[in-house]
Image (cartoon, rainbow, N blue to C red):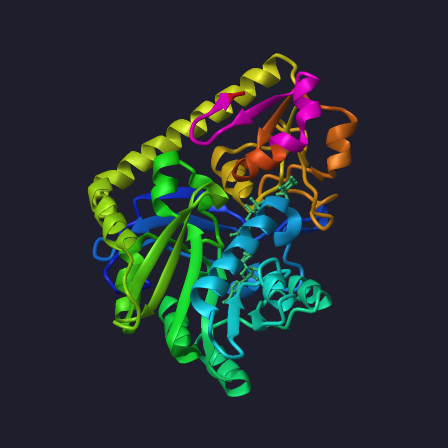
Amino acid sequence: MQKCRSCDAELEPFMSFGKQPIANGFLAPAEFAGEYFFEMRVASCPRCSLFQLIDQPEAERMFHGNYAFFSGTSSAMKTHFAGYAELVKTAYLAGEKDPFVVEIGSNDGIMLINFAEAGIRHLGIEPSANVAEVARGRGINTASKFFNRETAAEVVAANGKADAFMAANVMCHIPSLHSVIEGIGVLLKDKGVALFEEPYLGDVLAKTSYDQIYDEHVFLFSLTSVQHAFARHGFELIDALPQGTHGGSMRYVLARKGARPVGPNVTRLLQAEQVAGFAKPGTYLGFKSACERSRSDLVGLLRDLKAKGKRVVGYAATSKSTTVLNYCGIGPDLLEFISDTTPIKQGKFSPGMHVPVRSHAEFAAKYPDYALLFGWNHAKEILAKEEAYSKAGGKWIHFVPKVEIR
Ligand code: DWN
Ligand code: SAH
């Protein structure tokens, strides 16, 4: 029996997404035979409401020198991280002498560039060596390591304590949650703050965006589960700020208990989570039915378009698309290829279902009749970029919050 990674309560999986491969494991035909799969089952902790995978592949299978996701592929995300950095500087670093900030999962430096350019002491902790190298090339101090309690002690020994700990879309990737929180405790000064933002459980449930569930995302957090986990280490939420990124995220701000005032959002959002039923099993059974409905609607639509002789391609070979393709059983018979701007994904095949991944130039050279929008979280940016496709009569297939042609 799997125990909750935060509070040790026994977990009962409420649903399985079937056999899933490494979501960012884009591969060549010679690698098909040896491809790794695991059964992706999910549970919500009956005690602390932490939504989690029952099994997660080991970290080194997912984060290594060929990691396929580069944060800088979205221009909207660059603007978003400039805003995040600005908040940290103005609300938490102003007045500090020679402040020091640490970001984990700093990837290609999309956030830390804003500190490096301002001459602020900073360090990125990024285990995927290829993306870390890109950041170093931009003048961003980056250590290629996994963050945990031990790494935090090393950072403090070399640099002193930090004023701010920052993270985005990475806390939900690390199964040893308490080692990370202990690390934050070691790292921060007494009045230091920890900020992290991750896909929000409330948005995933409300929008049936089940594609946020894949190997890397071992957790989907809520204020309830975050407050519970951090309380054990003497921290409390002092603010929580909903974000529109990645289809709906939450930015959590924590400090040592009593060190800083607690903002009104915390109580309001905690209460909203109670009303929404994050602790109730029925909520997850409803989510399971909604996922099944979404799957049958999407497969039905793609089969129908194929029968009519239409060309359908995928747009953006996101990590999320791996869950959709494998859960729905969508392969090259239903999807001609997936267009993606990341050079190391191009010419390879999607994990598990082996749909070819091609450059954006191939999409633009001969527009399909329909584009299945796997990068739906970047819809605003993508639809603006692809005005010519829409003007030429190209249609978009959306599947969040429901399957529809727009
Ligand atoms: O949490 C995570 C988030 C931050 O990023 C990671 N575990 C992995 C990754 O998830 P993702 O792959 O679902 O991220 P995105 O940002 O939704 O998708 C990125 C992919 O989309 C890249 O392969 C590039 C592609 N893309 C594209 O082809 N054209 C993206 C944009 C904006 C575009 O215009
Ligand atoms: N923060 C960026 C990147 C998110 S992708 C953004 O929001 O766009 C998740 C990143 O976390 C990857 O680059 C991965 O290599 C890194 N990561 C995974 N486990 C980690 C750990 N234990 N410590 C630090 N970084 C980690």
Image quarter (top left, top right, bottom left or bottom right) of the N terminus: bottom left
Q: Is residue 175 left or right of residue 36?
A: left
Is 317 displayed left or right of 361 in the figure?
Answer: left
Point 42% across, 40% down: residue: 210
Q: Nearer the viewer, residue 3 or 113?
A: 113
Vertical placement of 295 versus 24: above or below? above
Q: Please, is residue 251 above or below residue 289 in the view?
A: below
The x and y percentages for residue 318 are: 58, 43
Which residue is most to the top? 308
Which stretch appears magenta?
383-404
| Residue 152 appears in view | yes
Q: Residue at x 62, y 34 (%)?
A: 382
Count of numbered circles in the view = 0
Find residue 75 and report its horizontal and vertical position in percent: 63, 46
Judge whether residue 57 is colored magenta. no
**Residue 7 locus on image (x, y percent):** 26, 64
